[in-house]
Amino acid sequence: MSEAMQTLPHKFSSKITSTPARYLLEMTSPTSIPSHSHLASPTLLPRSLLPLPSPGQRQPPPHRIMFAFTTPTALSVSNFHPSPRRTTSPRRAHHATPRMSTYRYSPTVDEFFARDVTRQYIAKACPTGEPPLQCIEGNTFDAPYESRTLKRQAQLRYRQLPTAVKVHNMYETRREALIACHGCSHEEARVLNNPMMATAMIVGQAESTRACSRYIRAAGKDEDVMVRSVENVYMKAVNPGGVFSTACTDGQAKYEAYLSQVRGKAAEFRSRQYSKAAKAGAAYAARKRATARTHICVYEDGLYNKYPKMAGSMRPSFGYYAPFVSRPSDGTQARVGGIAKDPGYVFAVEKLGKMLSSAKN
């Protein structure tokens, strides 16, 4: 043992000698180590404490950062300065800071993560490979294409919103995604850096567990009143002046908004065909999601337990509140009103109208 290591306290010297042989450090001066440093903790090593290379080994360049490879080290993205913060404990959603970012944002990577998350939730909702009754894209061949066109319209309109609204939606989506990560520090780091992935996680989790008001039938008129009240509050938040803004994603023509309402009624009609276990699971998932994502209030928790359909309406809609972050080239690919005069619309409306009228009778 060198003279420098003999001058260290016993608790430090024991940790040094217990490390692998190729990571043993040869100290040049006892004053180069502060009294509060721990060599076994995930900290960056100063240049005076770098491992000495062998005589035939090429020395690393001065700009390269060396680590002690015993435990992981957390880095901050601002100016690439090292951060001594440990990563052993999970990060909490209520203490989210920009220093949690570990790499720079890449739209291509974000889009890849979002598609992968969506694919996983689709596999969870369709374990046998066949779409169940939960599929809400429509009953005709042209309905799925119209849903994709509607999504493109939402992406195009989202870019016309003010910057303050976009930032607010981004942080709200990030907060929702952090809660959905259930304390996993790895997933939290992903959703903090990838807003598209965060949006896909929120929507996918709600759809796979059926924690949405579309899949729950109201028990009475009082629950219908509560659901309409919640929807009116959300609508006033989007349109405070009473005039529909660019955030309205129901379409450009008058019949597109009506078709969106028909699709919602069709989804509600198909939800009645589920088994009792599936209906009870959807109500439980709606209560759980609403309780976890709202502030602690005993009165609201009681309302969620009493009215599961109202609990399912406490959600960020995929068109109004969840942000769409995509590459600049996607704006030129948006097809607005591509199937506005498709005759399949008339057939879909007539068929769904007959189904709803027969269900009421």
Image: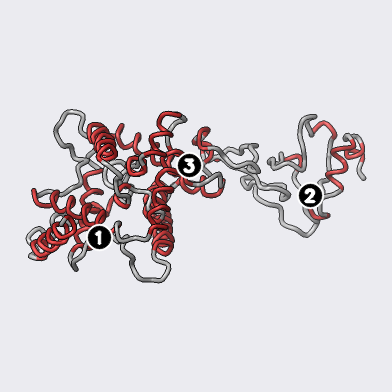
Q: Which residue is mark 3?
A: 179
Q: What is the three-letter code of the residue carrying label 3?
A: Ile
Q: Which residue is mark 1?
A: 137
Can residue 153 be seen by looking at this rendering? yes
Q: How many labels were placed on the picture?
A: 3
Q: What is the three-letter code of the residue carrying label 2?
A: Leu
Q: Does 165 sit above or below residue 53? A: above
Whole-angstrom CA distance, mark 1 to mark 3, is: 28 Å
Q: Earlier in the sequence, mark 1 or mark 3?
A: 1
* Mark 3 burial class by Cα count in 10 Å: few <14, some 14-19, many 20+: some
Q: Does 141 sit above or below residue 74? A: below
Left or right: 38 as drawn, with respect to 167: right
Secondary structure beneath dot 2 equals: loop
Q: What is the three-letter code of the residue carrying label 1?
A: Glu
Numbered tag placed on residue 52 in the rendering: 2
Secondary structure beneath dot 3 equals: helix
* Mark 2 burial class by Cα count in 10 Å: few <14, some 14-19, many 20+: some
